[in-house]
Image (cartoon, rainbow, N blue to C red):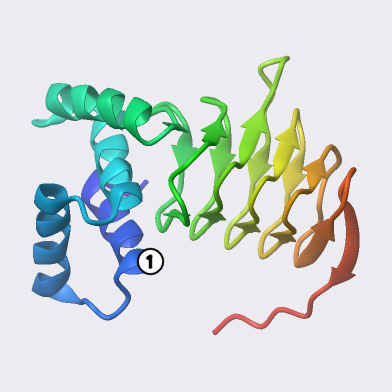
C-alpha cells in the first residue's frame, strides 16, 4: 500500500512530467500555495484528507471548500491509485465506494455512480472522456479508453476502446507497455 506522500508524488508526475526529485517536491508545495492547477490542488487535499495524519483536519476543511468551489465530488473514502489526472475540474462526480486504479484520467462532467451502493471498478491506465456516465456495478479493464459521451452499463475488457449510448466496444488495442 502506497503512502499518502507517494500517491501525491505519483499524481504530481502526471501533471508535471518534466519535474523530478527535489524540484517535484518544490512544485507540489508551490501549487498548494498558488493553486495554479486547481484540479491538482484539489487532489492533494483529497489525498491528505483520506487518512489520519498531521494535516488531516486542515485538509478535510480545505477539501470540503474546494469540493464546492470547483464542482468536484470525489470523496476521501474513494480508493484511488497513484497517478490520477483530472483533465478539467468541472462537474466530476465519483461515488465514494468506487475503486480507481493507477494512472487513470478523468475528463470534465464524468459521473461514476450507483443507486445500489455497488459502483464501478476501474483498472489501471484508463482514460475516461468528457461527459461519460458509468452506471452501477461494472468493471473497466486495464488500458481501456471510454469515448466522450458514452454511457457504460456493461463491463469493458482490457485494452478496449468503447463509445456510444449504451457503450459498446468498438476496437481492442494491442497494448505494449513502455
Question: Where 140 sits versus 67, above or below?
Answer: below
x, y percent for residue 172: 85, 71
Q: Which residue is mark 1?
A: 14
Give SS at disc 1. Answer: helix
Question: Where 49 sits versus 12, above or below?
Answer: above
Q: Is residue 136 left or right of residue 81?
A: right
Question: Where 177 sits versus 10, above or below?
Answer: below
At 72% across and 38% down in the image, what residue appears?
134
Q: Quadrant of the C terminus?
A: bottom right
Query: What count of labels does the image hold?
Result: 1
Please tell me which residue lies in front, 94 or 148. 148
x, y percent for residue 122: 64, 46
x, y percent for residue 16: 29, 70
- Crowd tier of the residue under label 1, counting other residues whose Cα lies within 10 Å: few below 14, some 14–19, many 20 or above: some
Furthest residue in direction top, as rendered: 116
Q: Quadrant of residue 118?
A: top right
At 90% across and 43% down in the image, what residue appears?
166
Please tell me which residue lies in front, 76 or 91. 91
Q: Quadrant of residue 143?
A: bottom right
Q: Quadrant of residue 22?
A: bottom left
Q: Is residue 66 left or right of residue 161?
A: left
x, y percent for residue 104: 53, 56
At 17% across and 55% down in the image, what residue appears?
31
Amino acid at each position: 500500500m502506497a503512502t499518502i506522500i507517494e500517491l501525491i508524488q505519483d499524481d504530481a508526475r502526471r501533471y508535471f512530467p518534466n519535474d523530478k526529485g527535489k524540484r517535484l517536491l518544490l512544485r507540489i508545495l508551490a501549487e498548494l500555495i498558488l493553486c495554479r492547477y486547481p484540479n491538482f490542488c484539489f487532489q492533494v487535499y483529497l489525498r491528505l484528507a483520506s487518512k489520519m495524519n498531521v494535516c488531516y483536519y486542515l485538509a478535510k476543511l480545505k477539501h470540503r471548500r474546494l469540493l464546492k468551489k470547483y464542482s468536484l465530488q470525489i470523496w476521501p473514502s474513494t480508493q484511488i491509485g497513484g497517478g490520477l489526472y483530472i483533465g478539467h475540474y468541472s462537474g466530476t462526480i465519483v461515488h465514494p465506494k468506487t475503486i480507481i486504479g493507477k494512472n487513470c484520467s478523468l475528463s470534465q462532467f464524468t459521473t461514476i455512480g450507483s443507486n445500489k451502493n455497488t459502483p464501478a471498478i476501474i483498472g489501471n491506465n484508463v482514460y475516461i472522456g468528457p461527459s461519460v456516465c458509468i452506471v452501477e456495478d461494472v468493471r473497466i479493464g486495464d488500458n481501456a479508453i471510454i469515448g466522450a459521451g458514452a454511457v457504460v452499463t456493461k463491463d469493458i475488457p482490457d485494452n478496449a476502446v468503447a463509445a456510444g449510448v449504451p457503450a459498446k466496444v468498438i476496437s481492442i488495442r494491442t497494448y505494449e507497455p513502455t
